[in-house]
Amino acid sequence: MKYTKQERNWVMYDVGNSALVLFNTSVVPIYFDAINTAANSAELVTAWANAQTIASLVVALLMPILGSLADFAGNKIKFFLGFFFTGLVLCFAQAIPMGAMPFLVVYVICTIGLNSSMTFYDAMLPDITTDERMDTVSSSGYAWGYIGSCVPFIVCIALILGGPAALNLDMLLCVRVSFVITGIWWLTFTLPLVRTYKQRYSKELAPGETFGSEVMKTFRGLGVTMRRIAQDKAILIYMIAFFFYIDGVHTVISMATTYGTSLGIDSTQLILALLVTQFVAFPSAIAYGKLSGKYGTLRMIIIAVVAYVAIVLFAAFFLKTAVEFWILAVAVGLFQGGIQALSRSYFGKLIPKERSNEYYGFFDIFGRYASVMGTLLVSVVTSLTGDASLGVLSIGILLIVGLVMLIRLSRIKGMA
């Protein structure tokens, strides 16, 4: 399929932000472990889970209100840029030497900027393509994001692993330089989207209304949007299902390296395995987009959720060595991009286009509060039992609940 200029530039932002997502899920937890020398393995998992929880909670609280305001003409790109530049500045700030807890605060604010910009980015999808092309374009975003993010990541890993011997540089310094490299990559692949994006669908201010009065109406209007969602049975069931199953997906992604570290797996093995995940995810996400056209979007989402249940069981009961972590990384790569891309595009087909940001704001509430619940669940179970494997196993419950809701949805909408 040949992409339009707007579709291509929209995909490029996935290439940019995915570099930071990959770096945050692979190298940053190991870096945090290195500067947080006083913590044991269970404390490390708990601290990292708490940081993820706080970042997700803040985004979940902000997005419904800001999302509704962003639906007015011209606002979507403004909110996007505000959060993008916040995340970018804090990405560079992580390169400054600091203690473990100050670093965690900077990381949380950077993550808030990154994840919030991605919410507005997702809501741009109905503006830049059609319903018929949405699955393919969304899948291409994740696919090229996976493969494109590998370029700066390989450069950073080469610097981190080779810098101490080849350049006589401290390894922690190499990690700090890598934050700068990743930030520059993110900026470079954001600029094309900023230059060409046009908001096609928007709400208009009523005669005599000002933006200030509309802000007050937004707070009152949240209840109206919630009622609209509650009255649309398909959207409601899908969002509840999404709340649970995406929790498992995000928690597996965000906690994988920390969990591997707690098991004593070598950091180099963890990083290289997650790099393989990116390469596997590229063709898998493309394939998912094509298969959804043949077998139905909802059916492919259900298949991915079943696969994630198996992945969580494997991680909890069988993951002990670096070889098994590599198996886990490949399995995640096969389904990660597909489930994220199709979840985004399937929701875009269900909602009214002129209120896309408003609905995606609530969509993000469900996704972010799910992330809060998932990482908090892992943190609590791990703290109470002292066993990170039991914390990982608890994710499976959420996936199964999501699966049941998706099956219920299929009886209403079919598998399309």
Image: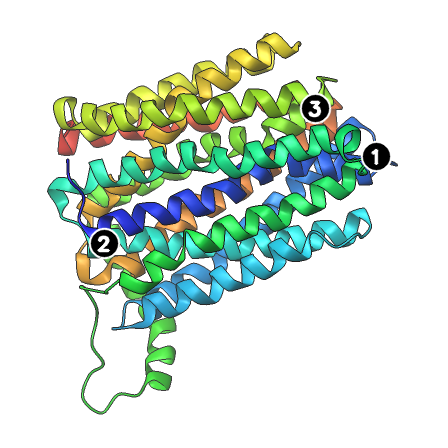
Q: Give the residue at mark 2.
A: 6
Q: Amino acid at mark 3?
A: Ser
* Residue in view at x 42 percent, y 33 percent: 146
**Measured from the top left, where is residue 174 in percent x and y?**
72, 40
Quarter where residue 227 is shown? bottom left
Distance of label 1 from label 2 (alpha carbons): 47 Å
Q: Position of residue 263 (x, y in %)?
A: 72, 18
Nearest the viewer among 230 and 263 is 263
Q: Quadrant of residue 75?
A: bottom left
Observer-nearest residue: 91 or 110? Answer: 91
Decide: is 297 above or below 178.
Answer: above
Sequence order check: which comes first, mark 3 or mark 2? 2
Of the 4 image quadrants, the one containing the C terminus is top left
Alpha-carbon span between mark 3 and mark 2: 39 Å
* Residue depicted at x 81% and y 40%: 35
Q: Which mark is residue 267?
A: 3
Which labelled disc corresponds to residue 39?
Answer: 1
Q: Is residue 394 left or right of residue 131?
A: right
Q: Residue furthest bottom?
A: 208
Crowdedness near tag 2: few (<14), some (14–19) or many (≥20) residues, C-alpha within 10 Å: some
Q: Amino acid at mark 2?
A: Gln
Left or right of 25 in this view: 199: left
Which of the two discs, 3 and 2, sits closer to the camera?
2
Dot 1, how many residues are within 10 Å of its Cα: few (below 14), some (14-19), or many (20+)? few
User: From where the camera sits, is residue 45 visible?
Assistant: no
Looking at the picture, tell me which residue is in the foreground, 284 or 61: 284
Q: How many marks?
A: 3
Identify whether 416 is placed above or below 326: below
Q: Given contact means CB atoms under 8 Å apart, are the residues at marks 1 and 2 in contact?
A: no
- The disc, 1 or 2, on the residue closer to the chain's N-terminal end is 2
Quadrant where the N terminus lies? top left
Label 3 vs label 1, nearer the camera: 3
